[in-house]
Image (tube, rainbow, N blue to C red):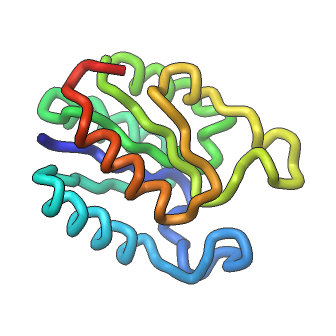
Amino acid sequence: MKILVINGPNLNMLGKRNKAIYGNKTLAGLETILKNQGKKLGVEVVTFQSNGEGQMIDFIQENYSRAHGIIINPGALTHYGFSLRDALEDTSLPIIEVHISNIYARKEFWRAESVIAPIARGQIAGLGFHGYIAALQIMAEKPKGKR
């Protein structure tokens, strides 16, 4: 089983970016944790990060046919990434949307709106890196094509 883990804009700055919200762990650290957890679950984890919506779409379109699910933290594209949403929906793969912070508890009202949530099996927000691990465990239990 292969799971794609996609991180969007600014998540490459984890460990440097607003530590009060995002903590001090890095994206490289997150990727290592997920790959190690994947090995324990018998799942190949393929990670990708981009600050550009087009690059994220290209990655999805080039890799979805060999994957069984997608875990995605779309970053700011959560709120307005309609092209990304369409690319995800076109895969017909199960999707879990993950956010390190609780987007519903943030000050800015627009952060609570997700264009990805309606096509996702579920959304995990506010649990830090634990949210990714939970998403991976859930994804490992569900066969391909089951949203």
Seen in the image, is 145 located left or right of residue 22?
left
Seen in the image, is 106 located left or right of residue 146?
right
Q: Nearer the viewer, residue 118 or 137?
A: 137
- Picture residue at 32% right of the left edge, 49% below the top: 136
Query: Horizontal and vertical percent for residue 88?
Result: 40, 26
Seen in the image, is 64 located left or right of residue 10?
left
Q: Quadrant of residue 36?
A: bottom left
Q: Nearer the viewer, residue 31 or 84?
A: 31
- Picture residue at 47% right of the left edge, 62% below the top: 130
Query: Horizontal and vertical percent for residue 132?
Result: 43, 55
Q: Quadrant of residue 18?
A: bottom right
- Picture residue at 39% right of the left edge, 69% below the top: 30
Query: Horizontal and vertical percent for residue 79?
Result: 68, 36
The vertical placement of 50 against 74, above or below, is: below
* Rendered-image quadrant of the N terminus: top left
The vertical placement of 27 against 45, above or below, is: below
* Rendered-image quadrant of the C terminus: top left
The vertical placement of 119 against 21, above or below, is: above
Mark yes or no: residue 62 visible.
Answer: no
Count of numbered marks: 0
Query: Horizontal and vertical percent for residue 142?
Result: 25, 31
Mark yes or no: residue 113 visible.
Answer: yes
Q: Nearer the viewer, residue 56 or 146?
A: 146
Q: Nearer the viewer, residue 103 or 49?
A: 103
